[in-house]
Amino acid sequence: MKPAKAPKVTIRDVATASGVHFSTVSRALDPARRKRISKEVLELVEETARRLGYQPNRAASALRTGRTHTIGVLVPDITNPVFPPILQGIEASAAARGYFVFVANVGDPQLARPILARMQAQQIDGLVMAIALRDDPLIDFVRDNGLHAVMVNRADESGRLPAAVSDDRLAMKLAVDHLAALGHRRIAHLAGPQNVPTGVGRRQGVEQAMHDHRMKPPRVVECESYSREAGQQAMRTLLASGPRPEAVVCCNDLVALGAYDVLREAGLRVPEDISVTGHNDMPLVDMVDPPLTTIRLPHRELGWRAAEMLFDEIEGKSLSASTVVLRPELVVRASTAARNAS
């Protein structure tokens, strides 16, 4: 015979045990209304709720408020080191409001709509998107379905959705300015995929910066993805297609590591024979040989800002699309050096 289940602890149980009025306990346990409660009462209610093992009834709350206190996040590659700190920022903002975060890895863009449909079936209150392509019909789909949504790390060029992004053009300007100060003139660019906003923005940043320095336009090889393997292929193409550049600006750190691999295979030294820069300052790039000069981005803040914008949308505080642009910074390490005059 199975033991009888213990009765579920209710808000009325917490109120009785704490000696606090039912309505006050209800507000104290509601993230959206708890600001109205004094610190002392909050601490008493929370301690009592923990002691009794109280668990909020999300279904009842959803019926009462029309919200499930969940948001969805779509990322293109969960293995890319860029996304964990972005997710940390999103989750920090969500946790402060009592929200739960559903994260989905969308490796194939064709899977985006089926995954989003599953999230809608779970009645998410909003969506953070890091996956959109340029002119992506998914954005219209999201808007047409009335979903509260923001973008992170990528912005919609037509401004249909709010976004939190880093300044891609400035990032590449910082890299080119650094290489120009070292005397480099023949600078190539391993560009990101041109069907995503970041790939286009970074390429434009390199081209504009070189134009400002009165250099010849860069030789550009487009990478199929933001991966080490794509960086290897692009670097092989670059070396095989013309004179060796003095420096290479890479669209991200993984691509830069792929470039390292091919340069090493070709018997070329970094930075003695060719300087290399990356983008993102992902973990451990200061430990590779040589440590990578790169662009550092505030990834956690990007995630936090995107989530804050989403919650403003959900709460009706901001109904127009806007873009928050955060400033990148150059981190100089040993993969760049003055041009070898010989």
Image (cartoon, rainbow, N blue to C red):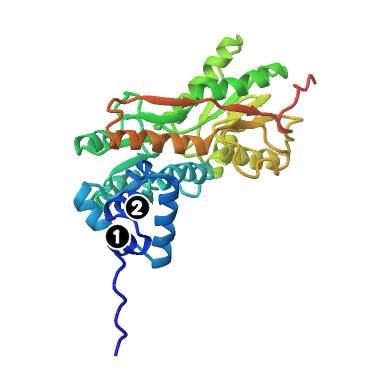
Mark 1 residue crowding within 10 angstroms, few (<14) / some (14–19) / many (20+): many
Residue type highlighted by circle 2 = Leu
Image quadrant where one finds the C terminus:
top right
Q: Is residue 240 visible?
A: no
Q: Looking at the picture, how far across and down is residue 101, in whole percent?
A: 38, 50
Q: Is residue 174 above or below residue 130?
A: above
Q: Nearer the viewer, residue 56 or 178?
A: 56
**What is the quadrant of residue 182 in the picture?**
top right
Cβ atoms under marks 1 and 2 closer than 8 Å: yes
C-alpha separation, residue under disc 1 versus residue under disc 2? 9 Å
Q: Looking at the picture, how far across and down is residue 111, in whole percent?
A: 31, 48
Q: Nearer the viewer, residue 262 or 58?
A: 58
Task: Give the farthest residue toward the bottom.
Answer: 1
Q: Left of 307 or right of it: where is 335?
A: right
Residue at image location 45% in from the left, 38% down from the top:
304
Q: Nearer the viewer, residue 43 or 119?
A: 43
Task: Give the farthest residue toward the right.
Answer: 342
Q: Left of 96 or right of it: where is 330?
A: right
Q: Give the structural element (helix, strand or loop) at label 1.
A: helix
Q: Is residue 93 visible?
A: yes
Q: Looking at the picture, how far across and down is residue 219, in whole percent?
A: 56, 23
Query: What mark, if any, has residue 29 been given in the picture?
Result: 2
Q: Is residue 210 above or below residue 276?
A: above
Residue at image location 66% in from the left, 26% down from the top:
247
The residue singled out by tag 1 in the image is: 11
Residue at image location 41% in from the left, 29% down from the top:
197
Q: Give the structural element (helix, strand or loop) at label 2.
A: loop
Residue type highlighted by circle 1 = Ile
